[in-house]
Image (tube, rainbow, N blue to C red):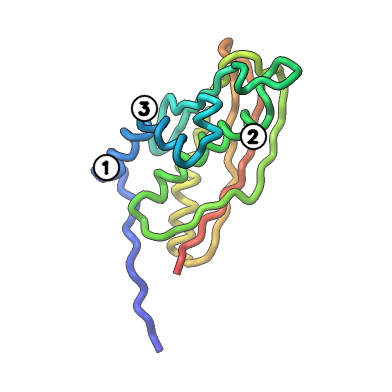
Amino acid sequence: MDTERKAIPVFDAEAPGLLSLIRNLSTPWKMRLYFLRRLPSCWFWGVRISEIATDRCRVTIPYSWRTQNPFRSIYFAALAGAAELSTGALALIALHGRGRISMLITGIEGQFTKKANTLTTFTCEHGEAILETVQNAIDKRKGQTVRVLTIGTNEAGEEVCRFWLTWSFKVKS
């Protein structure tokens, strides 16, 4: 018995709904409300999306009493949360308007090279790879993974850490 599969729309970078999502992700007070409701740790830490587009995302996390560990640097879990958001926001963009597709982190690896004791900015420039992986998951109707890099830098522009996150995408039936 043949069952007709519902067609999933092709990604459109100029779609009004997508542009609205990007505007919402770029609006600080809307993101704070979203964090308070869905990601309270990001709200507590003061994480902010400072720049977002379909191919790139920048997220900042302050060095403050809320993020500080006993060694006077930003706690690794807070850094990991900000790193995840810099890649996850790109995944949300890739999934927007594409139907029911699950996303899940299946792996994370971090490397710390310098003490994070100032505002730290995570930059992920792998939006295209995420878009391609989502499209492959749709086309093949099979789970697909992508490993993306996000780099954390301090206020002087020096690298303090890097995270590799593996995202899995699967079309829900």
Write the residue at 46% across / 32% down: 57
- Foreground residue among 147 and 82: 82
Single out the residue that lies furthest toward the right: 71
Q: Between tags 3 and 2, which lies in front?
A: 3
Q: Between tags 2 and 1, which lies in front?
A: 2
Q: CA distance from mark 2 to mark 1?
A: 30 Å
Question: Where on the picture, by quarter, is residue 81?
Answer: top right
Q: Between tags 3 and 1, which lies in front?
A: 3
Is residue 142 shown above or below 17?
below
Is residue 59 shown above or below 39?
above
Side of 165 where 94 appears, left or right: left
Between discs 3 and 1, the one toward the N terminus: 1
Write the residue at 59% across / 20% down: 153
Q: Which residue is mark 3?
A: 29
Between discs 2 and 1, the one toward the N terminus: 1
The three-letter code of the residue at mark 2 reads Phe
- Residue 14, numbered label: 1
Image quarter (top left, top right, bottom left or bottom right) of the N terminus:
bottom left
